[in-house]
Image (cartoon, rainbow, N blue to C red):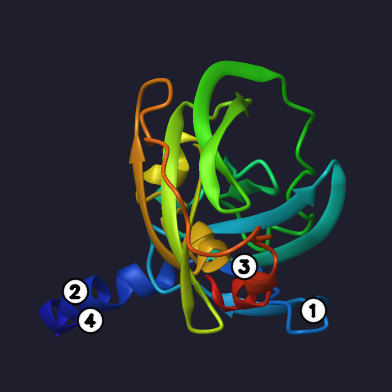
Amino acid sequence: MHLLTLIFGIVLLPKAYTLKCHECVPRTSGTCTDTTKECPSRIHQCRAVRITSYAGGSKLADVNMKTCALDKQCAEGSVNFGISRTVITSKCCTSELCNTEHAPEPIKSNPSGNKCYSCDGQKCTSILKCEGGEDHCISATVNIGGEKTTVKGCASESICSNKVNAQIKGVIAGEMTCCQGDLCNSASSTSTGLLLLVAPLGSLVMFS
């Protein structure tokens, strides 16, 4: 009998220690209501994440979400294509229903000293000064309306790694490659005109 109790205790222990977190996944309206979610495992934390997009210094989108997350998903980063810049901020915690507040707004960043090529019209020969922690150059192929085009710019290490790769892929909606070193994302031409990478923001509501 004692052995059976011990076995059931071992089996049920991982479940007993999982956190409950606020979950808030915005729909197409951009708003959401907090609900309670039990995390799938003991290694999950509670997370609040904010994804903010800018163009020409103006804020174009500000999406807030809450859910359970793994430690590697609690990263922050930004991707800058010159014509638009998207910043991800996160706030994670490890107590019951602790993700009450939204993630903080991005702070104003200074030039990082790195330079990358960016696209302007049909050419990708413009030189972009990277900001904040953007220490990589990025090239992305996107598909808009069935037509592929190339965009280039700056990105932080977390964007180029698997840490926030899922979130930013929802913004880019296409393949991307990264490199380190000034102007390492070589200049080239692109088949279409200027692309504002804000249309795919609606897909951000699907991320967890």
Between disc 2 and disc 1, whose residue precedes?
Answer: 2
Tag 1: amino acid: Cys
Residue under numbered circle 2:
6
| Residue 34 picture quarter | bottom right
* Mark 3 closeness class: few <14, some 14–19, many ≥20 residues within 10 Å: many
| Residue 20 picture quarter | bottom right
The residue under the point 56% across, 83% down is: 145
Q: Position of residue 78 (x, y in %)?
A: 59, 42
The nearer-to-camera label among 2 and 1 is 1
The nearer-to-camera label among 3 and 1 is 1
The residue under the point 61% across, 71% down is: 204
| Residue 37 picture quarter | bottom right
Query: What separation in Å lies between label 4 and label 1 (alpha carbons)?
Result: 38 Å
The nearer-to-camera label among 4 and 1 is 1
The residue under the point 43% across, 31% down is: 136
Residue under numbered circle 3:
21
Q: Residue 8 — which label?
A: 4
* Mark 2 closeness class: few <14, some 14–19, many ≥20 residues within 10 Å: few
Query: What separation in Å lies between label 4 and label 3 (alpha carbons)?
Result: 26 Å
Tag 4: amino acid: Phe
Tag 3: amino acid: Cys
Residue 15 as seen in the image, left or right of residue 85: left
Tag 2: amino acid: Leu
Considering the image in quadrants, where does the N terminus appear? Answer: bottom left
Q: Position of residue 189 (x, y in %)?
A: 45, 50
The correct choice, above or below, for 157 with respect to 190 in the image is: above
Q: Position of residue 190 (x, y in %)?
A: 47, 56
